Image (cartoon, coloured by chain):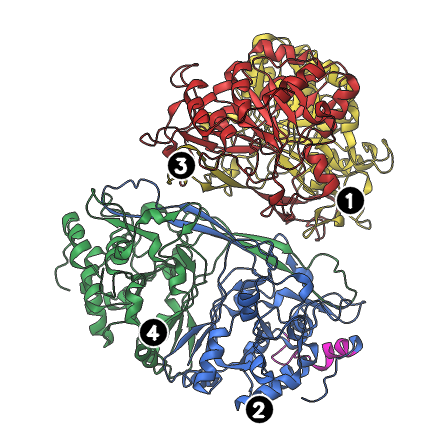
Chain colours: A blue, B green, C yellow, D red
């Protein structure tokens, strides 16, 4: 692999301008890289369904705290099957309620533009993608700009899986091991695939396999993800949605003074949509078996009014 | 239209046996009519994507109580864009939490088998589809059987929209006006389409249009949906998922002694999966414009552990 | 009754200075009028227990939406008595969880200083009582100043009930009928009692009786409470806690440009503690029967970390 | 100290009959030992206020998970002080919501009768105190019997603190060290006080001090509390409310086949009210300084409809 260069803080700050898509789709655009997905892309994607296989890329949403999910979602039964129904015969039922905070550390979710606020000049106000003021995301009204509703129409495009552990010939990445653009290039070469404009890019680090083998991840272990150096690559390739199977930003952050750079430059400047915490284990096995890493990818975010993200179940059809 | 017969309570109770799919896919099967969706069906569905059009069939999840959604979902901001970020430059963010009770009256959701408990003999215990005891759906553990996780792998098949108001030449059905099997037949004839085994059936009553025109629905108005008489039709056609754009059972119930018959016989006996509260307004307009009512339908339920259902954003690709 | 003068906006704004207790108990004081409650006051209060009678002044916290409580508290059972316990004999149990938003319109609660942010000069930052910046009450950390924990040690003092409907010879006040300082004086005279420094003042409008007789209150009806003109009276008497049996500020607000004046000048300038939505119906009957309107009053707020208020059950001992 | 005998399972089961208060206050009574608190008791209690001192016995309700509170309460800000108020001057505000599950392991709370279900004969249905069927505590309706509302009128009586570590001459009890009736007798003798009918009994193990010195308690450490052998003592003395400063039952349970015996026999048979997780550290220091361990004790449970308990802030006045 080629030498990997870790960009400096100054370089990352400069990317807020040089990688920016602000204005590219008009001054009022809020959808960012979703604009790259055309009917033609969706037709291309549908054409990739050849076996009729369907694979979910979502993790299970559980209810017990773990060291890597200390404040999990909560589940409340509103009616159970233990009671005595009002009817003697016919139909009764059970129902439940969920308390979900998608940006928590373990739930598969899609980030809305409102989730990332950026600025590179301390004299300017914080904004989201395309310059709208972050202060319009309020505690009382929620995301009055940049809401997940922007993707409420659904996201369907060609999906490409880049399987980094396979290319590196390991079972999974460990610790805070970063994924560099050279890794993405190497995976493309090894897999014989190329990421193109409007694609949904799934990047496998293998974290879900690591977790199932070694158990919940202590914070000190760190977490593999995209190194900020991948940002120019993502911009150049015009990726529509990027999702590493972790939190997408390496943990602990290599840029504590800047916050998360992939979420920052990616969402704030590029207008990139980010998928956090998916699971590509089954998909990776199937892709390897079929010898192809492209498919129809489908993401259907909930239309949560004025919200900063949604839990999702991303689907791959091959 | 042919004479429409409202089945009696006794008839509905008899259907618990005569329409049953118990044992059809083995004594331990929990997935019911999802077994009807094969790789071949998914290939067929992908082939229906011809324009690259993508249409969401989900309603927006809002936060304000209305007369037809008196206990809505709740939205809590965990971090807003109003505060002062820790960083001077770079990236900050906003996040939120949601309290969602999918079986409430207005959220688009998919019912899990655990949602419907049935019995036709008061001497027997209540069960879910295929005879598992309903008492295993507990307040402390949730749906230890029949969980929405059974559909966590995603649901993709050929979708068919039957547009009842279009066939009846009205803007939308009103009040408690039931949809009969004769309506389904008439829509098929008018649209030149036929529902086949493994299909995802969308039945339009037009309720979302009625609501946008006339405002929230008072309880006394009643709600249109599938009359129980449709149950033999659904079973005969081997529908995999059925979703009228209301609560699927006519309100107020015509069978108060039995509970909801479509949810009862449908889910409990047939093992049918039911989609509640979708919105087909945009889809109906597009289908009419294109002159075809079949498409690739995609539903990606959240993998909510031990749960009786999931909010979803059903997608149609044409 | 003497002529009642409705203060102007300018007058109310001037009270932010002229009625202020800022600095009175030191520059760092956060407890405001709770400083007026001394051990001697508590001894005096205990001496008022003569019959051994105990009366709650809290409303019931229910779970159903009503027109005057459209987003009520929520109740979730975590374990019920319907299931089969693990043990054959001995002890099993039931438990539950509550979602409570105390400042909602119907729950009896005590406001923390952090609940009211004030300024009278648009060039200055918003603050809470004694000048601490309101921006320290954050969405991520909560009330890092002015938390209800300041009253976590409990509040016990002499309580005085001023029964306005009794003085006016009506069953209860109706609509947006304001209580003026002349009403307070008249009630004192009629009851033969005088409010003194450090007292807990209960002001009865009779709203709970009106509600039980006439049903939930439509918003358009308005709500009786303390007119802003009472503020100098409250300050002059050095009341420690004030609680009218409504939301304390007349609704609809007579000062929409200023927000709620009793909560504003009262909490922000005077450092007054406010009790919202209590119920004095039983207490009023007992006081009238005994011919005395003073008692030991006890309020035990929950020690909710970094919070803007707490539900409470205020108790009166006579 | 006299020899301490650990009762057998059979003995505990026998106490369900021999210590029972069922029927003592009539066949329909739901209030159990609260019947022991008379106006005369409340007068006696008020007479114990001699210094005007007020001490809270509640723990702080925090929001972060710990090893001994892995699923803590949750705090949501609904409005903060970070945003821009609608008004230019006057009053704005902040508010919040709480998700509280009182029977969790760290919140000071009062158990309602509905919290404990008992039976000593496997052929009989489970019941709460005085024989009402536990199945009436349902997931959909909550505690339709035995609700905390039974104590909604407030609880005020003579309080007595028995300080076990002081008597044993240690800073605090450690691990699963049980408190025996001999400990209660020894504390009475050492302190010169005697627990009488209708009293509120506070039993100090010193756990909060142990926790502040040693940090959160790992589960394996166990937890000190009342050994089941104290049950006849509590019944004989006619205690109205009992509250050790832990979960009241020794952990891990010495009677896993029976569930928690103090909660079982105490609440189910005796009709005793139990206060869980209070904090007597400040109270113990003050009692020792004053040389008296009796006081006015006040508990004001929230009137939570159909609920199995309430968070409380128990107050002691001396």
Please check the rendered image and state whether residue A1 is part of the magenta-colored stretch, yes or no.
Answer: no
User: What is the spatial separation of the Cα atoms under label 2 and label 3, in whole angstroms?
Assistant: 61 Å
For the residues marked 1 and 4, what is the alpha-carbon distance in whole angstroms?
Answer: 59 Å
For mark 2, name the chain.
A
Where residue A76 appears, x then y in whole percent? 47, 48
**Residue picked out by circle 1:** C127
Is residue B225 visible to us here?
A: no
Seen in the image, is A205 located left or right of residue D32?
right
Question: Range of the magenta residues?
Answer: A11-27
Residue D295 x %, y %? 68, 17
Tell me whether circle 2 and circle 3 mark residues in contact (CB < 8 Å). no
Q: Which residue is mark 3?
A: C81
Q: For label 4, count other residues whose C-alpha is less than 10 Å away and answer few (under 14), some (14-19) or many (20+).
A: many
Residue where numbered disc 2 is placed = A189
Determine if residue B114 is in view: yes
Residue occupied by mark 4: B157
The residue carrying pointer 2 sits among few (fewer than 14), some (14 to 19) or many (20 or more) residues within 10 Å by Cα, namely: few
Left-right relation of A187 to B205? right
Q: Of A205 and A168, which appears nearest the observer?
A: A168
Residue pushed farthest front?
Answer: D3
């Amino acid at each position: 692999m080629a030498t990997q260069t870790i960009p400096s803080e100054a370089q990352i700050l400069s990317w807020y301008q040089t990688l920016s898509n602000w204005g590219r789709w008009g001054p009022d655009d809020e959808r960012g890289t979703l604009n790259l997905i055309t009917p033609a892309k969706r037709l291309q994607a549908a054409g990739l369904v050849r076996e009729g296989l369907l694979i979910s890329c979502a993790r299970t949403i559980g209810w017990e705290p773990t060291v890597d999910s200390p404040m999990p979602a909560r589940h409340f039964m509103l009616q159970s099957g233990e009671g005595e129904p009002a009817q003697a015969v016919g139909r009764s039922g059970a129902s439940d309620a969920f308390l979900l905070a998608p940006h928590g550390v373990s739930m598969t979710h899609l980030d809305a533009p409102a989730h990332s606020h950026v600025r590179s000049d301390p004299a300017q106000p914080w904004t989201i993608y395309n310059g709208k003021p972050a202060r319009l995301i309020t505690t009382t009204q929620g995301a009055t700009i940049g809401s997940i509703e922007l993707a409420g129409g659904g996201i369907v495009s060609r999906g490409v899986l880049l399987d980094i552990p396979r290319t590196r010939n390991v079972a999974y990445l460990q610790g805070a091991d970063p994924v560099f653009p050279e890794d993405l290039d190497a995976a493309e070469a090894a897999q014989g695939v190329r990421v193109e404009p409007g694609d949904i890019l799934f990047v496998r680090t293998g974290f879900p396999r690591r977790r199932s083998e070694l158990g919940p991840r202590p914070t000190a272990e760190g977490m593999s993800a995209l190194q900020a150096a991948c940002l120019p690559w993502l911009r150049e390739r015009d990726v529509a949605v990027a999702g590493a199977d972790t939190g997408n930003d390496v943990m602990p952050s290599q840029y504590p003074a800047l916050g998360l750079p992939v979420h920052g430059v990616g969402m704030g400047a590029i207008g990139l949509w980010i998928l956090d915490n998916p699971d590509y284990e089954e998909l990776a096995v199937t892709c390897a078996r079929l010898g192809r890493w492209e498919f129809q990818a489908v993401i259907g975010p909930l239309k949560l009014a004025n919200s900063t993200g949604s839990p999702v179940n991303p689907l791959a059809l091959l």
